[in-house]
Image: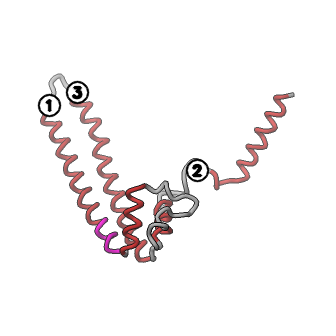
Amino acid sequence: MLGFVIGTACLIGLIATVRRGRRFRHFGRMGGGPRFYLRRLFGWLGTSTAQEKVIVSAADELRSSFEEARGQLFATRTELADALRKPSFDAGALEEVFSRHDQALQRLREVATSAFARVHDALDEKQRIALAGVLENGMSRGYRGRSPYRGAVAI
């Protein structure tokens, strides 16, 4: 008898989940996609459309630059494994890997510097102070649509 009750409860839960459809497909993730945090940030800062375009383009450049640097790190694993398989250790091959890392980090620094300079120029003083607070404290402090930075900075 208990089995029928548990089975019925599971069936009701399954039907309810299927009826909700796509809405709960990404259960556990906050929001819907990579732009969720940017939309949340735009709401906190009160940005205009032109400012949002500048910030989105800067974020896209940073993301692609980080992906390039990450690709270098993944390639490093196989090269280190190859260096360890050889009967004698080749320090030159390891230096070549490190020089590629240095080049990738240099490109990342240049892209980050130009992206943050563009964002700095696009925002006004109050928005920059609020953005600095978000960067310093993280985005998890603003919940349920309220900004933890609005009380300190009149936006």
Q: Residues within 10 Å of mark 2 (few under 14, many from 20)?
A: few
Q: Which mark is residue 116?
A: none
Q: Is residue 70 left or right of residue 145?
A: left
Badge count: 3
Report the residue at 64% width, 55% height from top: 23
State the SS at label 3.
helix
Q: How is the image coloured?
A: secondary structure
Label 1 is placed on what type of residue?
Asp
Q: Quadrant of residue 113?
A: bottom left
Of label 1 and label 2, which has the lower sequence position? 2
The residue beneath circle 1 is 90
Of label 1 and label 3, which has the lower sequence position? 3
State the SS at label 1.
loop
Q: Rounded to the nearest whole Å, what is the CA distance between mark 2 and mark 3?
A: 41 Å
Q: Locate the N terminus and report the quarter of the image it occupies.
A: top right
Q: Is 115 rendered above or below residue 79?
A: below
Q: Is residue 59 left or right of residue 15?
A: left
From the viewer's perspective, is the residue at label 1 or at label 2 nearer?
2
Which of the two residues, 145 or 115, is positioned nearer the viewer here? 145
Q: Which mark is residue 26?
A: 2
Q: Rounded to the nearest whole Å, what is the CA distance between mark 1 and mark 2?
A: 46 Å
Q: Which mark is residue 84?
A: 3
State the SS at label 2.
loop
Label 3 is placed on what type of residue?
Leu
Which of the two residues, 71 or 2, is positioned nearer the viewer here? 2
